[in-house]
Image (tube, rainbow, N blue to C red):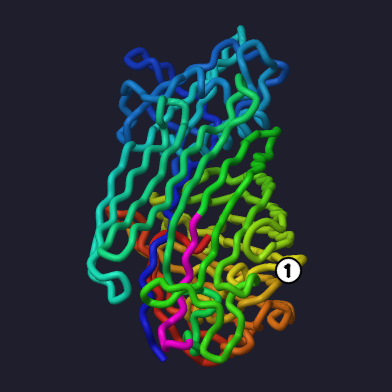
Amino acid sequence: MLSVLLKSTAVVTLATLAVWKPPIAQASPIPQNPIQAEQDVGLEEVTLKETIVKDVQIYFVNKDGKLIRGHTHKDFILSKLQLKLGQVFSEEILEADLRRLRRLDAFEKVNVSVKQDATGVDIIYEVQERHFPALSFGGGNSGDVGIYGRVGYEDGNIGGINQQLDTNIQVSGKDVQFDSKFTSPYRTNIPFGYRISAFRSRDFSPTFNKNINLPNGDGIREGRFGGGVALLRSLNTWDAAIGLNYTRISIRDRNWKVSPVDQFGHPLSLSGTGIDDLYTVSLAVTRDMRNNRSYPSQGSILTLSTEQSFPIGLGKVLMNRLRANYIQYVPVTWIGARQQTKNPELAEMLAFNLQAGTIFGNFSPAEAFNLGGSNSVRGYDQDSLISGRSFALASVEYRFPILSALGGVIFADLASDLGSANSVLGSPGVVRAKPGSGYGYGLGLRVKSPVGLIRADFGINDRGQSLLQITTGQRF
């Protein structure tokens, strides 16, 4: 079986750290060659013991390395640094500061150099900012909603302090959908950052997406409406967020009429009405040790989260959801240094991803963990492998450059619902014959394009089925 799936995901970029002792240059106040991971010329080990930082300089450059006037406030950048004027120099702290700056959405690249003399060291940062704001437009004709138009707006550096607004709106003759988020990140001069979000979405249900329809013969749609507020705080190498959230989940037919059961009478909601209300408090902590937020080539990121609901509203949902996600990037040079690309999106590496989750208590079946598809187990159709109370997922990729703008991937994915499918109300995964566990493997291509990294993966699953999936960005 061969089919094609088109989907969009996030796209990311990379850079790395080195310490560079530049030659004396009279014509420019900054080094002539920024520190780059792919450059060997000019790199030199610098041993600095009990040396005092006598200056921290910040310069904004364009993609060609030329000085420009930046939009970001320099005081905001300095507030993110632990290694400040008058402190004892430490390469370890310098590396941590560089990773922290590279995780900011406002920046495309951040490089650093160190200059030493008898009186101490100067630390020089070169910052290339992302281009904001960005507008996107789209539209089409869907058999479900008819003719529709879509507009998106993104700004990742409002006010020059990394405040972010990301919003998308879709309008059709039948429906209006939106997803908006505003984030004001934590800064050292205020107690907390904050995030505000609101959304309204309607699509085919990932839980009830196979074989069984509604009593009137329509496919099962799932509507979600809600929002949340969260407080944000950074603690050393950890970022934390605690939030209050509300989601109304409704199961509907093609005309968006609520339906409580499917064609065989299986319940589609905890309340029995087709609608469940979900009021939760959430807590998430992340330890991000990647060398870059965008297209990392080494390091790791660990995210742990819990979400506790309260029995308020329809369904009186009382549950606790736990999740863990760990990613590790390991640079390798198996194909040889001469074949390496200067495009960080296509760098050679091994990448590993481990995920797990479980839900305690009574929950809406629409809240089950759904796996299968381009962002979980490739070779399976979207959400066709698992609908369970619990899950475990493992993925590994070998990524390598082929040409200057073309890379390849060898991948394998494995997942299981840990025997939890029957503990979901109505057993939606069981009655829809979702396997509950399985694996996929295959080959992929990565193409660097003007619109970002295009991903094409051809996967074969353990049932002998094959699937070509085309989307954007790396799998993880």
Q: Is residue 258 left or right of residue 304?
A: left
Q: Nearer the viewer, residue 9 or 468?
A: 9
Query: Where 10 falls versus 121 (above or below)?
Result: below
Residue at image position (32%, 74%) is: 144
User: On the image, which quarter does residue 85 sit in?
Assistant: top right
Q: Is residue 468 visible?
A: yes
User: Which residue shows up at 48% across the image and 42% down it?
Assistant: 15
Tell me if 355 is positioned left or right of 173 in this view: right
Residue 266 screen position, x and y as percent: 60, 85
Which residue is label 1 attached to? 362
User: In the rendered structure, which amino acid carries the disc numbered 1?
Assistant: Asn
Residue 420 vertical placement versus 405 (above, below): below
Residue at the spot 42% in from the left edge and 54% down from the top edge: 11
Q: Quadrant of the N terminus?
A: bottom left
Residue at 39%, 88% (x, y): give it: 2
* Residue 218 magenta-highlighted: yes
Q: Nearer the viewer, residue 21 or 309?
A: 309
The spot of residue 7 in percent (x, y) is: 39, 67
Q: Give the structural element (helix, strand or loop) at label 1.
A: strand
Nearest to the observer: residue 347 or residue 134: 134
Residues in magenta? 215-225
Determine whether 390 is above or below 304 in the image.
Answer: below
